[in-house]
């Protein structure tokens, strides 16, 4: 059974930091690119950060560049999102995503249930 379980969200003051974690099970984690998405109330889900299966490359939304860092530990089947200098506009539900496209074109796409982040004084 595939599972992605996020944790680490919560209430933080502007300028503060949080570290989100996502533990994966039920699939070969090291074969999947992993991403963090977020969805604020009344807005569409957006990509925050993504990392390749071996952790060799990452990319970020312009709005979080220089503040957020995505990383992974394939030995622990875990992907992280370190969030620094948080702003009220970072308030959202944060979702973990795992994705893999096979050589023959089949796409596997898994989602977690989300962890809430609220940035407020």
Image (cartoon, grey):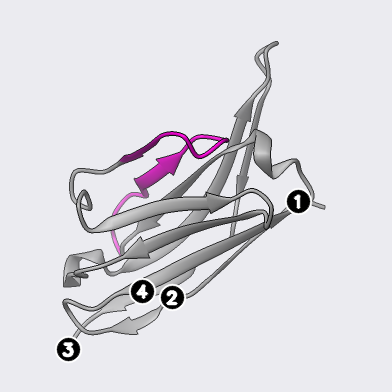
Q: CA distance from mark 1 to mark 3?
A: 37 Å
Instruction: Read off the residue under disc 3.
Output: 121
Mark 4 or mark 1: which comes first in sequence? 1
Q: Is residue 113 visible?
A: no
Left or right: where 49 falls relative to 15: right
Helix, strand or loop for disc 3: loop
* Residue at image point 57% right, 61% down: 22
Q: Is residue 70 above or below residue 18?
A: above
Instruction: Read off the residue under disc 2.
Output: 9
The residue stretch that appears in magenta = 41-59
Instruction: Read off the residue under disc 4.
Output: 18
Q: Is residue 58 above or below residue 104?
A: below
The crowding category of the residue bearing disc 2, from other C-alpha atoms within 10 Å (few below 14, some 14 to 19, many at least 20), is: some
Marks 1 and 3 close (CB-CB < 8 Å): no
Mark 3 or mark 4: which comes first in sequence? 4
The crowding category of the residue bearing disc 4, from other C-alpha atoms within 10 Å (few below 14, some 14 to 19, many at least 20), is: some
Mark 2 or mark 3: which comes first in sequence? 2
| Residue occupying the far right of the picture | 1
Mark 1 or mark 3: which comes first in sequence? 1
Q: Which mark is residue 2?
A: 1
Helix, strand or loop for disc 4: strand
Q: CA distance from mark 4 to mark 1?
A: 26 Å
**The C terminus: image quadrant:** bottom left
Marks 2 and 3 close (CB-CB < 8 Å): no
């Amino acid at each position: 059974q595939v599972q992605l379980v996020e944790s680490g969200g919560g209430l933080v003051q502007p300028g503060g930091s949080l570290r989100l974690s996502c533990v994966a099970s039920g699939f070969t984690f090291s074969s999947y690119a992993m991403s963090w998405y977020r969805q604020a109330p009344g807005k569409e889900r957006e990509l925050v950060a993504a990392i390749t299966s071996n952790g060799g490359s990452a990319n970020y939304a312009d709005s979080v560049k220089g503040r957020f860092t995505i990383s992974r530990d394939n030995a622990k089947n875990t992907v992280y999102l370190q969030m620094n200098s948080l702003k009220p506009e970072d308030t959202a539900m944060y979702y973990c995503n795992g994705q893999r496209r096979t050589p023959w074109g089949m796409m596997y796409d898994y989602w977690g249930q989300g962890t809430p982040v609220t940035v407020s004084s």
